Image (spheres, rainbow, N blue to C red):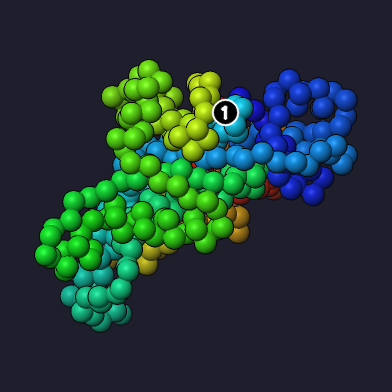
Amino acid sequence: MLVPVLDKKKNQLMPCTCKRARLLMERKQAKSYWYKGIFCIQLLKDPSDTAKQPIVLGIDPGSKREGYTIATPKRVVFNITTNTPDKVKSNVETRRNLRRTRRSRKTPYRKCRSNRSIKNRVSPSTKARWNAKLRVISSLQKILPITSINVEDIQAVTKKGNPKWNKSFSPLEIGKKYFYDQIISKKLKLVTTKGFDTAARRKLRDFKKSSKKLEYKWESHNVDSHCLCEILLNKELRPENKLYKIEFLEFSRRQIHVQNPKKGGIRKSYGTTNSLGKPRGMLLRSKKTKELVYLGGTSKGKVSVHNLVTGKRLSQNCNLVDYDCLGIRKWKIQLI
């Protein structure tokens, strides 16, 4: 496992080994730098060499979990396994039902509109899934000079002679086209690999793939993302079993009101992504105990704080002035 390195201006350099990073910090030539839970070092002097080797990113998409592997021609930097946003579809359906019920009450509502046929439209649930991948890529670009990306190409069956079906027949096809266009706009080299080619590489390397797709293990998804890096580099790399587990935080967006009214027909407002003016998910450090937590909800001038790893609520009666705000994080991260 390698450590990302940044210069004094936070520009990306080639990663180094953990031993070298420890040595640089002991000599006061670098300091620790945490970027959204990923450990990096920042140099305190000008680097002796700024030459860069190719750094590739392999992505194995999935419906519940996804695997990312970053590698150089010599070693694997690290692996990441994430979950996928899966509640957007139900949230959109709930919003639609609430909007329809308002039309039968004496209350302001948006008038009914016919379905709009928008060209190349990406549904909210599909867009949320692929935007999650783009957020991970953008975050990795801040700490690593990634040059190319290899994505396992997923496909859906078309219907011959049915252009209306083929135009918007599969969220996978529509989502991946949107995803590929966004990667190309970032000026990154994009390579796609068929699933059977990944399986052939996995068989050649005698890697075993786990059937338990929901587990945060290297054998579940990162075995394929590792093979994608080897295909792109055309070299065999030693597997790195350690990985970062990332779970995206989910927030209750602002609603007009709760679904069920209280006694007397009173409907109170519900949901927000801010707590006392600060975005939820912000990294906080206690001024007394120096404990690191993240910001949750608010009630009656108090805020709740949560554990960084498990997300468990530690307290819901805290004063925000008792904490230092360190930065915004929209996910939970753990090295396993």
Residue at horizontal 25%, vertical 77%? Answer: 116
Residue at horizontal 37%, vertical 67%? Answer: 256
The mark tally for this picture is 1
Locate residue 177: give its quadrant. bottom left
Could you tell me residue 290's position as x and y percent?
Answer: 71, 32
Residue at horizontal 50%, vertical 58%? Answer: 184
Horizontal relation, residue 143 to residue 83: left or right: right
Closest to the observer, 28 or 151:
151
Closest to the observer, 222 or 310:
222
Determine if residue 27 is in view: yes
Instruction: Name the amino acid, label 1.
Output: Val
**Residue that badge 1 annotates:** 76
For residue 113, above or below residue 145 = below
Closest to the observer, 101 or 120:
120
Residue at horizontal 82%, vertical 33%? Answer: 30
Secondary element type, mark 1 = strand
Determine if residue 334 is in view: no
Could you tell me residue 85's position as x and y percent?
Answer: 38, 47
Could you tell me residue 316's position as x and y percent?
Answer: 52, 41
